[in-house]
Image (cartoon, rainbow, N blue to C red):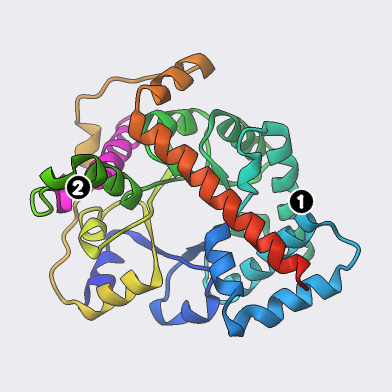
Amino acid sequence: MNQLEQLKQYTTVVADTGNFQQLAQFRPRDATTNPSLILKAVQQPAYQPLLAETVQRFPQADLAEVIDRLLVRFGCEILSVVPGRVSTEVDARLSFDTAATVVRAERLIELYQAAGVHIDRVLIKIAATWEGIEAARQLELRGIHTNLTLLFSKVQAIACGQAKVQLISPFVGRIYDWYKKQAGAQWDEAAMAGANDPGVRSVRAIYDYYKHFGIATEVMGASFRNTGQIVALAGCDLLTIAPELLEQLSQSTAPVARALDAQQARHAELQAVHYDEAGFRYALNEDAMATEKLAEGIRAFAVDTAKLEQLIRAH
């Protein structure tokens, strides 16, 4: 049995891609997209007609609406391949605007429903800022399920749990990147691999906290740099994995053992924490890595959304 099949015994495998033509071979349950992945996809010849067709069908629509329609078109194509859910992201430039995030999320859901997709098959991806988490809280109360992304700290995860969001995507690779860069020449790759990887440790801490306190929010590890990080999180509720790493897992027969265990987490000695807005902002500010990576992630997604707008204008 290859590593991918072994992993599926412990964890729900999700594909992290906009490239729906690649999905079937890995048989993931769900799929996640983001502006960068959609931008990457529409620049490939296979997907350019889809972009052109979306633009031509809605000549009166503004840029924001065309992007939403394009995202939903990709989402619908993905849902024709995967049996579960697709995550579709709200414009990152709205990350500090609760009301605008709610409006865009509701429009995405309306577009999916108009295409015949049931609301439970869509997760609206929102950056885990205080404003984003508050938007997600409001959306969940309306029956719209959310996936809180750009999540780099237990602080953000706890606030998401309080908001009763459906799912969080704590990042692994970008945390690893930050610590490796900080350490410079002192970085010891072997010593910081597997269970000792700082990104892996972050997700494990979040998972243990949720399971210990019976928080229903699903934990989906994201942003992987290598298969070692993935294997070290076997047992996590879900893991969203890029196609090239899914390919590597499918080519290896090395053993995969459960690494995260809900039963063990229930017996851990942990302190419950509650954040109001001021407490959240201060605690996040105290975490230099999470503060920097959250800001950087929002900027990067905003840049790629702007590039997507340029492509649309060119049509």
Q: Nearer the viewer, residue 263 or 16?
A: 16
Residue assigned mark 2: 197
Earlier along the polypeptide chain: callout 2 or callout 1?
1
Q: CA distance from mark 2 to mark 1?
A: 39 Å
80 left or right, relative to 247: right
Q: Quadrant of the N terminus?
A: bottom left
The answer to whether 304 appears left or right of 159 in the picture is: right
Q: Which residue does the image show at 25% across and 53% down from the upper left? A: 233
Residue 217 shows in this picture: no
Q: Residue at x 50, y 15 (%)?
A: 278
Asked if residue 213 is among those painted magenta in the image, a careful observer would answer: yes
* Magenta stretch contains residue 212: yes
Q: Would residue 207 be visible to someone looking at this image?
A: yes
Q: Is residue 120 above or below residue 40?
A: above
**Amino acid type of the residue that numbered disc 2 sits on in the rendered structure:** Asp
Q: Position of residue 171 (x, y in %)?
A: 37, 47
**What is the span of residues highlighted in magenta in the rendered image?**
192-215
> Where is residue 142 shown, x and y percent of the image?
69, 39
Mark 2 or mark 1, whichever is nearer to me:
2
Name the residue beneath numbered marker 1. Answer: 107
Amino acid identity at mark 1: Arg
